[in-house]
Image (cartoon, rainbow, N blue to C red):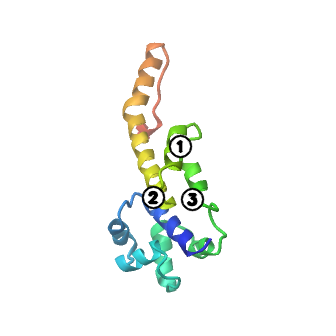
């Protein structure tokens, strides 16, 4: 892959983990703001083993995952594969919008991550209760796994 691809993967994973700002991830990972900025912009291509280990721990990657990304041995071959996994196949409108947005891969992944989070919140708050009400109205029973207190 290379260092730019690693940079894109780091940003995507950081956002996926809920760290929408560098500051949030810096606090969680122990990296310095400058080092994280260098990694996410592919400004440098050499880091200490301890820095890479902190990055991998912060991203919840396995040991050596950074090296595998840089050497092209990890993850999707491009950000399009990652985006494809993140967007439902039937979400043609979002695919079209992203395809014509002019955003880079990391920014597209940020948009997808935010949309996914909003969609999940909307489904849990509005869609599934409406579906449950209709099921009960028709005489069925509804069980929500996330409500299980066992």
Q: CA distance from mark 3 to mark 2?
A: 10 Å
Marks 3, 1: nearer the viewer:
1
Q: Residue furthest top?
A: 138
Whether residue 93 sits left or right of residue 89 in the image: it is: left
Marks 2, 1: nearer the viewer:
1
Whether residue 111 sits left or right of residue 4 in the image: it is: left
Name the residue: 33% across, 71% down. Answer: 27
Q: Residue furthest right?
A: 73
Image position, residue 11 (x, y; %): 46, 64
Q: Residues within 10 Å of mark 1 (few under 14, many from 20)?
A: few
Whether residue 28 sits left or right of residue 86 in the image: it is: left
The C terminus lies in quadrant: top left
Q: Residues within 10 Å of mark 3 (few under 14, many from 20)?
A: some
Q: Compare marks 3 and 2 and give the one earlier in the sequence.
A: 3
User: Circle 2 is placed at which residue position?
Assistant: 107
Q: Which mark is residue 96?
A: 1
Q: Nearer the viewer, residue 119 or 105?
A: 105
* Cβ atoms under marks 3 and 1 closer than 8 Å: no
> Is the residue 67 above or below the residue 11 in the image?
below
């Amino acid at each position: 892959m290379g260092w730019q691809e690693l940079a894109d993967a780091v940003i995507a994973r950081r956002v996926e983990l809920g760290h929408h700002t560098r500051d949030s991830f810096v606090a969680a990972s122990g990296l310095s703001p400058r080092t994280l900025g260098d990694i996410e912009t592919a400004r440098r291509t050499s880091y200490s083993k301890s820095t890479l280990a902190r990055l991998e721990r912060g991203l919840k990657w396995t040991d050596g995952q950074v090296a595998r990304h840089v050497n092209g041995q990890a993850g999707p071959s491009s950000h399009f594969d990652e985006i494809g996994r993140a967007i439902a196949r039937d979400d043609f409108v979002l695919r079209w919008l992203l395809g014509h947005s002019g955003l880079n891969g990391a920014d597209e992944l940020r948009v997808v991550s935010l949309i996914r989070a909003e969609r999940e919140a909307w489904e849990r708050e509005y869609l599934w209760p409406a579906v449950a009400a209709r099921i009960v109205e028709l005489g069925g029973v509804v069980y929500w796994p996330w409500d299980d207190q066992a």
